[in-house]
Amino acid sequence: MSIPIGPVLYLSGIPVVLLASALAVNFGNLWLALLGGYLMALGVTALMSGLWPAKKFRPDRRDYREALFIVAIALMLNELLFGPFATHLSGLLSAYFLPSPYVEMVRALPFWVALPVALVLYEGIGYLLHRISHAWSPLWQRVHSVHHEVEHFGVPLSFRLSYAEFFLHQMTRLLLVQLTQIDSAVIVTVIALATYGVFVSHANTSLRFGRMSRYLNTPDFHVWHHDPTLRVNYSIGLLSVFDRLGGTQHDSDSVPDRLGIDGLAQRRSVLETVMLRPLHEASDDSSREYERPA
Ligand SMILES: [Zn+2]
């Protein structure tokens, strides 16, 4: 019996992310948990892509170079815009608007109860935001189409996001989850798990994941989201169950013929990406009829 390498690799990274988060919380440094999640995600993704690469859609040097620039800009802007405020928001809001019995009840939840609740909430909001980002023209043309411009599928694609996309997710789903008053150690662990899912689901790999794709966001599930002819598999992060709930799932043993955006003459540069230049030349995703999976 052959070992299902893809599922084993994917699953074995999850306890490591949890362990890294637990250690970071123990040391009192929550950012270490995020760093642990990032490194684990990159490690597993590099392993899948390096040892079992897919023949199609491989990223080239330009894709890696662009990803590095985008990461540098995003990290810098993130720190400038959110650094001083991020940790104070939920505390401020709770003091004035939430009844104290509720806050005490949420704070008393055991870690292993709060974690799945926060994960489903965080990723569920992410799924909805992602669908809105395709359906609403300004968000599609100026923001989310950046992530769909390229025809490769690999690690650089997981970084190829407009800064407005970082902003949108920071100001909506992170804030909403913070508003619940769930402990910040739980929220950081959720972000580490979701980040792990984002990276691994963009791995350029020939590994297959089978039935696991029904529950977790695997590369062979997420690649169909980048097929220019379908609008399916919107789940982002670790879980893929939201597509099943939303009726947007597409399960297939094959891979798409092509990726990217039909009718795109030229993709934006990194600076254009950050400056939110609208993508008029591409087909307008927001005006398309929803295409049902076969
Ligand atoms: Zn998308």
Image (cartoon, grey):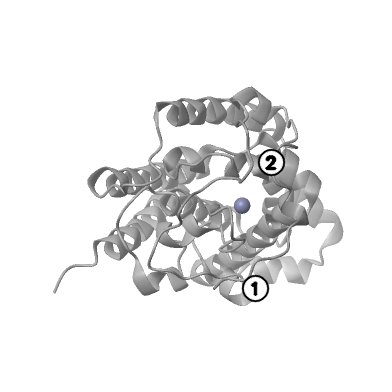
Q: Nearer the viewer, residue 155 or 122?
A: 155
* Residue 281, image x, y percentages: 72, 37
Labelled pair 2, 1 in contact (Cβ < 8 Å): no
Badge 2 marks a residue whose secondary structure is: loop
Crowding at dot 1, Cα within 10 Å, few <14 / some 14-19 / many 20+, comes out as few
Q: Name the residue rendered at 55%, 37% in the picture.
A: 160
Q: Which quarter of the figure has residue 98?
A: bottom right
Q: Nearer the viewer, residue 94 or 19?
A: 19
Q: Is 259 located above or below residue 272 in the figure?
A: below
| Residue topped by disc 2 | 282
Name the residue: 51% across, 48% down.
259
Visible residue check, residue 29: no
For the view shown, which residue lies furthest in the right direction? 96
The amino acid sitting under disc 1 is: Gly
The image quadrant of residue 80 is top right
Assign the C terminus to one quadrant of the image.
Answer: bottom right
Please provide percent x and percent y for residue 173: 69, 54
Q: The residue under label 2 is which amino acid type?
A: Ala
Sequence-wise, which precedes: disc 2 or disc 1?
A: 1
Crowdedness near tag 2: few (<14), some (14–19) or many (≥20) residues, C-alpha within 10 Å: some
Query: SS of the residue at dot 1?
Result: helix
Residue on which disc 1 sits: 246
The residue under the point 53% across, 54% down is: 227
Q: Is residue 93 above or below residue 99?
A: above
